[in-house]
Image (cartoon, helix red, strand yellow):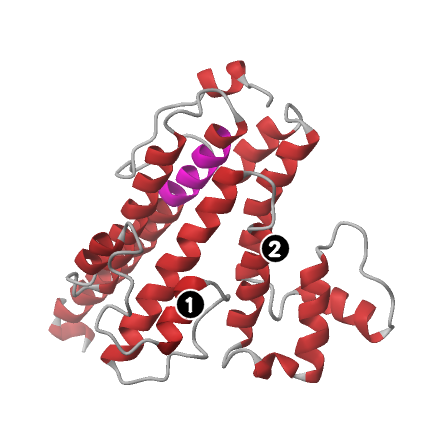
Amino acid sequence: MRNYYYLVAGLQDLQIEDSKVPVAVAQFRDEVYESLAGADRKLIDLLVLENSCRNFIGSERMQELTAVVKAQEPCPDGVPQFMYDFVQEYLDESWHDYADFADDRLWSLFYQYAMGCGNRFVRDWYRFNLDLNNIQTAITARKYDLDVRRLLVGDNEVVQALRTSGARDWGLSQEVPFWDDIMRLQEAADLNDRERKTDMLRWQWLEDNSFFCFFTIEQLFAYMVRLGIVEHWCDMDAQKGQQLLRQLIGTLKDQTEVPAEFK
């Protein structure tokens, strides 16, 4: 296992409440990438790929891959096979066999791919997120009397329990170590507040599980994820600030009395 003493020692302290990002995620990735061993680069590539999946459907990248698939050409170098397979399913609509939404099918394939990596920390990280998202989906589906079976992503023990168990806790309260934390998240009525608390739970998982990974790729991976969380909430706060400013300007305009000579 390779150690990155200089890189890890130079990391700036991060708190989820930070109002400013010390460095953009993309810039951080570029700065450390060349110093990483080949196998470690692939782990950082997973984070980039994860972000690509969020905007893949309908994107220019998907259009380019669609042309390749239609021409019956092999998967291009640098493109994960699961993306090629997804486009094939998307074109003939066979993704309907697995999910109600194409996005869910894509994420199922991504998680399967990510959890196939050889790094235990990264594999456990994606397993944690998969279970967290699926449990929250099941809770919401039960609340609104929806059929959860085709809304879940992936296929592991937690998913099987969520699909088949009629128990109040789906038989998972003793099996999932962060079950009580998820239940506390549901107490937040405001969706924005719930999302922030969910990110706090993710943040805590990263800190707990990377604590003894002193100068390894796990520390850099965890830092990049946490940097992305801070960046996300800084962007959200900026958008909220712009929205409040527009509302204030609109209110001021409505309240301004036009002088009689201009009426």
Q: Residue at x 34, y 52 (%)?
A: 236
| Place of residue 226 in the rendered image (x, y in percent of width and height, measured from the top left) | 40, 39
Compare marks 2 and 1 and give the one earlier in the sequence: 2
Say which amino acid is labelled 2: Tyr
Between 42 and 26, the residue placed more toward the observer is 42
Q: Nearer the viewer, residue 231 or 196?
A: 196
Q: Quadrant of the N terminus?
A: top right
Q: Tell me the element at label 1.
A: helix
At a point 51% along the width and 78% down the height, the residue shown is 101
Q: Report whether residue 61 is seen.
A: no
Q: Does residue 248 sit above or below 29 in this rendering?
A: below
Asked if 136 appears above or below 44 in the picture, the reply is: below
Left or right of 97 on screen, residue 204: left
Residue at image mark 2: 113
The Cα atoms of the two marked residues, 2 and 1, are separated by 17 Å
Hey, what amino acid is under mark 1?
Val
Which residue does the image show at 37% across and 38% down from the upper left? Answer: 206
In the rendering, which numbered label is found on residue 159?
A: 1
Q: Residue at x 20, y 73 (%)?
A: 262
Residue 142 pos. (x, y %): 27, 78
User: Residue 252 bears which disc, if any?
Assistant: none
**As rendered, which of 228 and 217 lies closer to the eye?**
217
Residue 100 drawn at (x, y percent):
49, 81
Q: Residue 85, located in which quarter of the rendered image?
A: bottom right
Say what secondary structure mark 2 lies in. helix
The range drawn in magenta is 220-231
Image vertical order of residue 211 relative to residue 202, above or below: above
Q: Nearer the viewer, residue 164 or 114?
A: 164
Instruction: Estimate the x, y position of residue 205 in percent, counting from the top left.
Output: 34, 41
Q: Residues within 10 Å of mark 1 (few under 14, many from 20)?
A: some
